[in-house]
Each structure stands twice: as C-alpha cells, then as structure tokens.
C-alpha cells in the first residue's frame, strides 16, 4: 500500500478498515493492518492480528517478519520475557539472524544486563562489521556503563565517529554521542547533541529527553 510506503500509517489505517470490511480474510490486508497498528502505537492490537495471521495462514510469505513484529511490539509493551522467549525460539530456526540477535541484545539492555548485550553486539559485528545498529548500540552501551573505563569511552568515540561521518543528522547516533559527551563531563556539547537529535527526529523524544536530564 502506497500510504504505508510513505509512512502515513494513520491514513493507511483508515483505508485498510474499508479493505478489511470487504475482504476480512485476506492475509496481505491483515498484515498491513498489523503494521499500521504497530506504527501508531497500538501494539496489543498488532500482536492479536499477527498471532491470528500465524494461526490461519501458516504459509504466508511474511511469516518471519510477523514474528519480528510480535517481538518488537512485546518489547514496546515491556513484555521482555515473552519477547526474549520468542527470540530464542526463532533463533533455533534462523541461526545467526542479525535482526533477532539485535532484538535479544536490546531486551537484555532493557533488563540492565549491559555486559550480555555488549557481548551479543560484538558477536554481531564479527558476522557483519558494518552493521550500524550494533555499532551504535555498542557505542551507547559502553558509554552508559556505571563506571566506564577510558578504553570504553575511546572505543565509543571511535564507533560514533564512523557512524556520524556517514549520517551526521541521524538522531539515534546523535543521542548516543550526547550520552558519551555527558559521561565525559562535556555538558554544553552534550546538550547541543541532544537538541540536534530532537530537532532531526522526534520519534524517540522521550528517550532523548531522559538522557538530557540533569543537563538543563
């Protein structure tokens, strides 16, 4: 659907409602509906629709993506154990799947298991040294340690230099850079990095504002 490709998920939901009333058992329509639910924050509904899809259409081509979306929505809802169990189940089927491994690291990060999350990201980068999600996540986790070593901060700096050289306006990278600067005691520079991140993309504003705490 064009509106989904454009990122107009609220409008797409309205259009899909009509399609569902006409073809309630079309898997593609239901899949698109779940995408829109997820992207507009209705994660409970997304999970219900996706689980129904798995049950009714066991050969649907987007099956792997359905599992990933269920995992993502459970993470957003704070259902970390359920998400982790599903990740581990899918990793038995798709060994070495970088997206699943990234989900696993993210869940462990949310559970404050930084060392385990760092290990996973390092393993991902052994498989793909240019995997940007892990480059950024590793930089963030190293800086976010309670007592990072100077080596941790140097490594985080090197990783973020690579990423920001490629995408200087990426809000996720700017946020990680702000965390690094904050940990180094560079208050003014950190505030500028966080403010730039907020200006470029407000999808993660709550996270960025949380990192901005105590600086303003």
Image (tube, grey):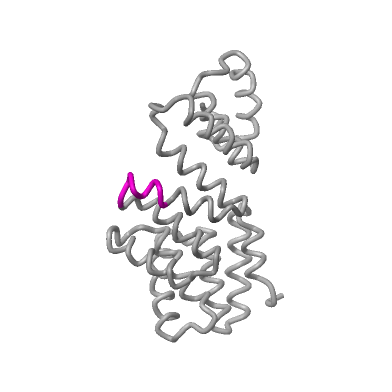
User: In this view of the protein, which residue sits in the foreground, 3 or 82?
Assistant: 82
| Farthest residue, direction bottom | 150
In the image, is residue 170 part of the stretch drawn in magenta?
Answer: no
148 horizontally vs 33: left or right: left
Q: Is residue 187 above or below residue 15?
A: below
Picture quadrant where residue 210 is located:
bottom right
The outermost residue toward the right is 216
Q: Who's the residue at 69% across and 77% down the image?
A: 214
Report the quarter where the C terminus lies: bottom right
| Count of numbered labels shown in the rendering | 0
Magenta-drawn stretch contains 91: yes
Residue 156 is situated, as x and y percent measured from the top left of the image, at 43, 74
Which residue is at a point 62% across and 80% down the rendered structure image? Answer: 187
Percent position of residue 118, x then y? 41, 69
Q: Measured from the top left, where is residue 192 in percent x and y?
A: 61, 71
Is 183 located above or below residue 10 in the figure?
below
- Residue 204 picture quarter: bottom right
Q: From which residue to which does the magenta span run?
A: 88-95
Q: For the point 63% across and 60% down, which residue is it?
A: 198
Q: Main secondary structure of the magenta part?
A: helix
- Residue drawn at x 65%, y 40% is 42
Query: How far from the left and from the top, in percent, is residue 85?
Result: 47, 51
Please state which of residues 37 and 9 is positioned toward the viewer in this rendering: 37
Q: Nearer the viewer, residue 53 or 6?
A: 53
Using residue 118 as the reference point, say whether residue 75 is left or right of it: right
């Amino acid at each position: 659907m064009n509106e989904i490709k454009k990122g107009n998920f609220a409008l797409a939901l309205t259009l899909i409602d009509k399609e569902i009333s006409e073809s309630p058992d079309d898997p593609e329509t239901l899949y698109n509906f779940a995408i829109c639910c997820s992207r507009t924050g209705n994660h409970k509904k997304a999970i219900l629709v996706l689980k129904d899809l798995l049950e009714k259409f066991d050969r649907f081509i987007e099956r792997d993506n359905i599992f990933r979306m269920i995992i993502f929505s459970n993470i957003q809802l704070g259902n970390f154990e359920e998400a982790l169990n599903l990740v581990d189940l899918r990793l038995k089927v798709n060994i070495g799947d970088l997206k699943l491994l990234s989900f696993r690291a993210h869940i462990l990060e949310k559970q404050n298991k930084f060392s385990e999350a760092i290990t996973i990201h390092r393993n991902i980068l052994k498989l793909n040294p240019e995997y940007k999600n892990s480059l950024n996540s590793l930089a963030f986790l190293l800086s976010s340690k309670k007592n990072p070593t100077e080596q941790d901060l140097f490594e985080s700096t090197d990783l973020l230099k690579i990423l920001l050289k490629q995408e200087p306006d990426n809000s996720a990278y700017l946020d990680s850079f702000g965390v690094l600067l904050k940990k180094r005691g560079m208050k003014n520079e950190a505030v500028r990095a966080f403010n730039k991140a907020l200006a470029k993309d407000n999808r993660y504003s709550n996270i960025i504002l949380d990192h901005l705490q105590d600086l303003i």
